Image (tube, rainbow, N blue to C red):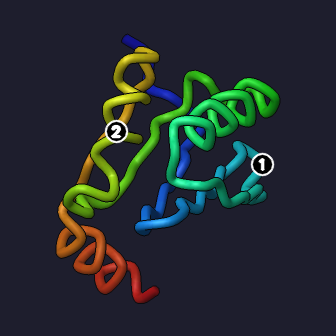
């Protein structure tokens, strides 16, 4: 398996989720979607549009708010990691960000 070169961070809330794509050239693209099945489909189309279907998607564990999106992404056979927010916070501290 080759390692993906694109990464997408996903921040999930009750009503919406925000996504940020880091391109190989170091530039970001971001967008917000409703946290609904229609929003999930719109996000998938956005990934396809930006040639990022093979990206590594990373989202925080947010209890019930993120389950539907994580399940949808897994069903699309996308590479998705659901990470403990404490790990993300600790990584940010080690990078001084």
Residue that numbered label 2 is attached to: 70
Tell me the CA gap for discs 2 and 1.
27 Å
Picture quadrant of residue 41: top right
Q: Position of residue 97 (x, y in %)?
A: 46, 86
Q: Secondary structure at mark 2?
A: helix
Reply above or below: 36 against 84.
above
Q: Residue drawn 30% across and 81% down?
A: 94
State the image quarter where residue 77 is shown: top left
Q: Secondary structure at mark 1?
A: loop
* Above or below, comparing residue 15 to residue 55 in the picture: below
Instruction: Tell me if label 2 and label 1 are in contact, CB under 8 Å.
Output: no
Q: What residue is rendered at 26% in x and 48% in y?
A: 82
Q: Residue furthest top?
A: 1
Q: Residue at x 54, y 44 (%)?
A: 7
- Residue 28: x and y in percent read 74, 59
Dot 1, crowdedness within 10 Å: few (<14), some or many (≥20)? few
- Tag shown at residue 75: none
61 or 63: nearer the viewer = 63
Q: Nearer the viewer, residue 37 or 66?
A: 37
Which residue is pictured at 34% across the width and 38% down the height?
70
Q: Depth check: give the residue in front, 34 or 6.
A: 34
- Decide which of tag 2 and tag 1 comes sooner along the chain: 1
Residue that label 1 marks = 25
Vertical position of residue 51 compared to residue 75: above or below:
below
Residue 45 left/right relative to 73: right
Nearer to the camera, 69 or 10: 69
- With 91 as the anchor, is 35 left or right in this view? right
Query: What is the x, y in percent for residue 59?
Result: 37, 54
Instruction: In the rendered view, tell whether residue 75 sits above or below residue 12.
Output: above
């Amino acid at each position: 398996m080759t390692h993906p070169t694109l990464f997408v961070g996903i921040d999930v809330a009750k009503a919406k989720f925000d996504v940020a794509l880091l391109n190989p050239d170091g530039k970001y693209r971001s967008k917000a979607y409703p946290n609904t099945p229609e929003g999930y489909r719109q996000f998938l189309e956005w990934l396809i549009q930006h040639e990022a279907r093979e990206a590594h998607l990373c989202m925080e564990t947010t209890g019930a708010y993120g389950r539907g999106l994580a399940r949808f992404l897994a069903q699309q056979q996308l590479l998705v990691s659901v990470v403990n927010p404490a790990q993300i916070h600790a990584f940010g501290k080690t990078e001084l960000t």
